[in-house]
Amino acid sequence: MQPVPASSPAPEHVDGRLVYAVGDVHGRYDLLKEMLGRIAADLAGRKDRRRPVLIFCGDYIDRGPDSARVVETLAWLQRDGRFELHLLKGNHEDAFLAFMDEPEERSRWLQVGGRATLHSYGVDPPTDLSDPQACRRACDALAAQMPPAHRQLLEELETMVVIGDYAFVHAGVRPEVKLADQAPRDLMWIREGFLERTERFEKRIVHGHSWTSAAPEIMPNRIGIDTGAFKTGVLTAIRLEDNRMAVFQTGA
């Protein structure tokens, strides 16, 4: 799919708000830092002084090299206060928390990017994932190295934000289920049953989780802003205003 123009019409409304939504970062602190600079520059060039909404669509950790710095940046944004900040829970955060609760049974997290997160906190991953004691030791070491504020941030993530005609989630929604009744696991993990649907959902869905290229997927019923930053080197965000949408990319 070809990238959309820098600014293009969008029929939906965000109730007069100014909304930025950022796709899956996956430990790419370099791209996140650049994106925050792009957003700051965009805001500096605007005449209105509305407090902007900044939404991250999950998967902050794993795969990329700097998960710890990404989480610290999100914690800084929480303290900073210039944005109305919403941090959504991705499937990688869900898998991380499951590992921290039951490392012996949930070691699969280490196979899908968790090793990189351990490294970012200065912890050596276990060499034998079938060894429950080795997984427990890695869990304990990570708990000791991770600042409490990081763990708290990852435990308090949201699963959905609704603004005007848009719903922001990590993975997608279960079709034919009302947004208010969506299961958290679907919001964090769904692919099959969601991506192939072409009919309108209750809201236009903005999501990450699934990517095929370095270009966002701009569809009538959904906007996919995961562009595989850890693999493609491209992080994507969108800016939404009533009837307008713009796409920002860093690393492109």
Image (cartoon, grey):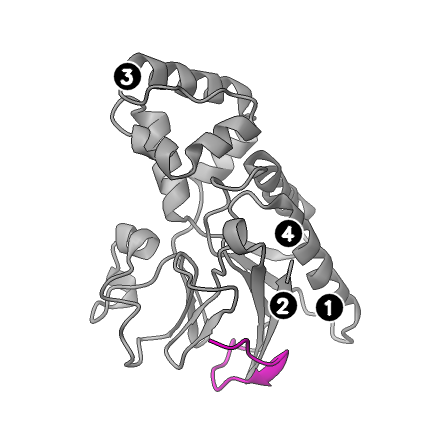
The answer to whether residue 61 is above or below residue 122 is below
Q: Which residues make up the magenta segment? A: 1-15
Q: Quadrant of residue 176?
A: bottom left
Q: Secondary structure at mark 4?
A: helix
Image quadrant assignment for residue 95: top left
Write the residue at 31% across / 28% down: 107
In the image, what residue type sits under mark 2?
A: Phe
* Disc nearest the viewer among 1 and 2: 2
Q: Which residue is mark 2?
A: 248
| Magenta region includes residue 13 | yes
Tell me, for residue 31, which label it has, or none: 4
The residue to which callout 3 is attached is 132
Residue 123 placed where, x, y %?
A: 51, 21
Q: Nearer the viewer, mark 4 or mark 1?
A: 4
Q: Which residue is mark 1?
A: 42
Q: Is residue 191 left or right of residue 206?
A: left
Q: Earlier in the sequence, mark 2 or mark 3?
A: 3
In the picture as drawn, the residue positioned furthest to the left comes out as 176
Determine whether label 4 and label 1 are within 8 Å by CB: no
Secondary structure under the numbered disc 2 in the rendered image: strand
Amino acid tagged 4: Leu
Residue, x 29% and y 66% (percent of image)?
179
Q: Are marks 1 and 2 in contact (CB under 8 Å)?
A: yes
| Magenta segment includes 55 | no
Q: Nearer the viewer, residue 178 or 189?
A: 189
- Which class describes the residues within 10 Å of circle 4: few (<14), some (14-19), or many (20+)? many
> Alpha carbon of mark 2 to alpha carbon of mark 3: how far?
43 Å
Residue positioned 53% across, 27% down in the render: 119
Quarter of the figure with the C terminus: bottom right
